[in-house]
Amino acid sequence: MNATDSASPRAWAAAGLLATLAGLAVGHFAAALTEPRAAPLSALSDAVIAVVPLEVSHWFIDLVGTADKPLLITGLGIGVAAAGAAVGVLWRRRPWPARAAVVVLAALGAAAAATRPGLGLAAAVPSVLAGALALAGLEWWDRKSENAESGARRAFLMVLGGVGAAALGASWWAGRSGPAGIEADRDAFDLPTPDVPAPDPGPGADFDVEGLSPYRVPNGEFYRIDTAITVPRVDVDTWSLRVHGMVDTPRTYTFEDLLGRELVERDITLACVSNPVGGDLVGNARWLGVPLADLLAEAGPNPGADQLVSRSADGWTAGTPTELVFDGRDALIAIGMNGEGLPIDHGWPARLVIPGLYGYVSATKWLTELELTTFDAYDAYWITRGWSTPRPIKTQSRIDTPRSKANSGTVTVAGVAWAQHRGIAAVDLRIDNNEWLPCELSDVATGDTWRQWRYEWDAPSGEHTLTVRATDGEGDVQTSDVQGVIPDGATGLHSVTVTVD
């Protein structure tokens, strides 16, 4: 059909935009009912992450930090919406090339979804539905636009907008309480009593200092770093954990199997390798789970298997030295966090928690698979992207308070320090360029948690530089050498400049 000029280019652009947005909303609704990772924008974002050059990825993460994924998906959404508006304008004069453009956009989304790890051809359906609705909407507008009154065109746009809004609302419902919702299952889960409770750190584990990070970080405030554009939504009733590879007897465990085993509770601090000096990508929590070494031992690991590859429901992988799983540390397959079931964002129904290693080589969320293999045979996700093979977490310390201003008089300077699996033996504070001053340390039960510190400073007026350093449980002092986070974690001393009034 050759449309007339009765509808302006602006009206055609609006029609294309709304048809595209309504299609995306319906596609995301279909994904929420089946597999949220198959949603068009989520799949496209995952595909971009998979193909973008490492230099660009590192630059973008350095620039925006943890906002990288929201900005990526927002940018793609704006791009697709703009493409839809352009298709609408093109359709006004050249409908067939415009139709082809819609098909190409839908095909890109479908291909991105179908090729994501852990998904298949069925994952293409949401993008196909999105393209079909956008195409149908523009066909309808084309038929109605010739000599149509502006009131009828406005009614059409309102109907299309209503379809998109309804689909978005339905997506929200489906993702939380509908057929694909898992929140209800997680909320209904009663965390079992541990067979082996965590040792009590003592009454002095938490200093009562305003602005100081608590000994245990609440779940809602605990840092989250992963590659998931859309958080995997795992059905606990069908979930299983497969143990295979270089083992005598491959095994598979259900969630009920884990609940029937000995459950150990431990306080363990996790840290991201991307955490800069003084950063907040670190936190301590109380975890409940199954000892990893005991479970792996039942499969009979081959002595030559020096790497344990863990896989997530979304295909992400981490590679852990096998010897560190069996050296006596409290490596867990965790099912609980701070007295409740794992939050969905933190790996429900099961994740790895291995003290002493950065998360990129140990802390797999939404865990589905454990493979015994070798470092020569396989490189996990971040190793292929320029990060080093596993290294111990580096000794770090941070000033939490004060950060910029203080009143003259006695000022409590406080923060946290960590060197997981070695522990913190001492923390020193330097004011301006004076000598190092020993700080008071909080109580801890093990070397696997961070430790609070504080110093009562008689602060004179003026501008002062505060610097902190820690000494680990092996007697090694935190280095002042400055290194960025790539390839194996940042080093240097945290300093803040404080103006005292």
Image (cartoon, rainbow, N blue to C red):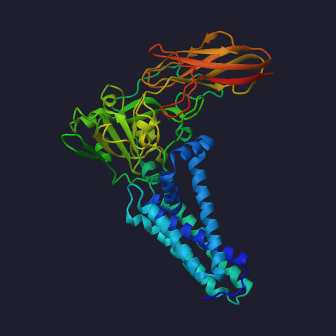
Q: Can residue 115 be seen in this view?
A: yes
| Front-most of residues 400 and 44 | 44
Q: Where residue 382 appears, x then y in whole percent?
A: 44, 41
Q: Where residue 277 appears, x then y in whole percent?
A: 58, 28
Give residue 142's quadrant in the image.
bottom right
The quarter of the image holding the N terminus is: bottom right
Give residue 335's quadrant in the image.
top left
Which residue sits furthest left?
Answer: 248
Give residue 165's quadrant in the image.
bottom right
State whether residue 234 is above or below residue 78.
Answer: above
The quarter of the image holding the C terminus is: top right
Q: How many labels does the image show?
A: 0
Q: Which residue is rendered at x = 48% and y = 56% of the image?
A: 47
Which residue sits furthest bottom?
Answer: 147
Q: Which residue is rendered at x = 55% and y = 67% of the image?
A: 24
User: Is 261 left, or right, of 234 in this rendering?
Assistant: left
Q: Can residue 192 be seen in this view?
A: no
Q: Which residue is rendered at x = 52% and y = 41% of the image?
A: 224
| Front-most of residues 477 and 260 | 477
Q: Where residue 192 appears, x then y in whole percent?
A: 37, 39
User: Is 19 left, or right, of 301 in this rendering?
Assistant: right
Which residue sits furthest top?
Answer: 435
Q: Where residue 260 appears, x then y in whole percent?
A: 28, 41
